[in-house]
Image: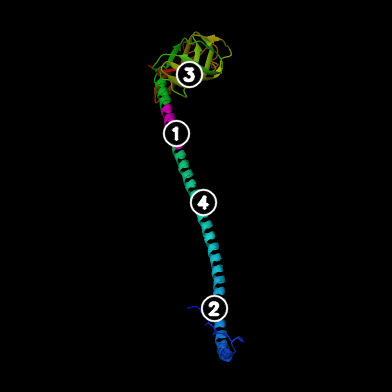
Amino acid sequence: MPAQITALPTPPSTNDPANFNTRADAFLGQMPTFVTQANALATEVNGLAVQVTADKASAAASATTATTKATQAADQVGLAANQVTLAAGQVTLAAGQVALATTQAGIATTKANDAAAILAQVQNVASGVSFSTTSLTSNAIAVGTKTWTVSSGESFVEGMPIYAVAHGDPSRFMVGVCTSYAGTTLTVAVTQTSATTGTISNWDISIGGVPGVPGAGFPAGGLPGQLFRKKSAVDFDTEWVPDNGGNLFSWQQQGI
């Protein structure tokens, strides 16, 4: 219960001389109690003022703490948002890596298939199978992309060396790499041409490159006769024989 001050008795008055002394004694006799109660009330009020001041400071500190916590919470929200963005970026990067790996795997597969096809063609050529075609497509002899209409079902593949020569005129040719072959359309990236130019509408097209420079051949007059040598006590005859182009090659057979 808060401190209280007892009400003072009726004070003396000169207008009431008959009761002056009695009221004066009662009024003045209450003064010590009044002072004590007044001091107690003052002490209580002071304590309340101190408490209010402390509560105010505490409230201010709590407000500061709340502001700090709110700022920290906002920072955490921002950090979480950044983490989400980073995670999304990592997911996108991973997806890109997967796509790149898939693309590279596809390229590797294509290259492997092309290499296998080229190897098959080389093996077929080595076994005596000829891979060539003809075309009546008109093309000017020049470096660049050239397209010919050829027979379908040929074995041309991307990356294969192509040699296109004017029919009946080996001095006019183009050399390049097959970039595509679909249906009856052959596309070649021409990188080298003959010195003789012109527009040709009758082509012989085959696998290969620029014809090599003819060898010097055997000295004039050839050999006076056959060459003989022994191997494991077996006679072998060796002689130089001209082919249809006039080039000499070595021919060897077991002697009789």
Mark whose residue sits in front, 3 or 2: 2
Residue occupied by mark 2 = 44
Residue at the image point whose x is 44% and y is 29% from the top: 111
Mark whose residue sits in front, 4 or 2: 2
Main secondary-structure element of the magenta-colored stretch = helix
Q: Amino acid at mark 1?
A: Thr
Q: Where residue 79 appears, x then y in whole percent? A: 51, 52
Q: Within 10 Å of the Cα at label 4, are there few (<14), some (14-19), or many (20+) other Cα atoms?
A: few
Q: Where residue 179 appears, x then y in whole percent? A: 48, 22
Residue occupied by mark 1 = 103
Q: CA distance from mark 2 to mark 1?
A: 86 Å
Q: Amino acid at mark 4?
A: Gly
Q: Is residue 51 visible?
A: yes
Q: CA distance from mark 3 to mark 1?
A: 24 Å
Residue situated in front as seen by the camera: 230 or 119: 119
Q: Earlier in the sequence, mark 3 or mark 4?
A: 4
Mark whose residue sits in front, 3 or 4: 4
Residue situated in front as seen by the camera: 66 or 226: 66
Q: CA distance from mark 4 to mark 2?
A: 50 Å
Residue situated in front as seen by the camera: 135 or 87: 87
In which quadrant of the rendered image does the C terminus lie?
A: top left
Residue situated in front as seen by the camera: 102 or 81: 81
Residue occupied by mark 4 = 78
The magenta stretch spans which residues? 99-115
Question: Is disc 1 placed on a helix, strand or loop?
Answer: helix
Residue at the image point whose x is 55% and y is 76% from the top: 45
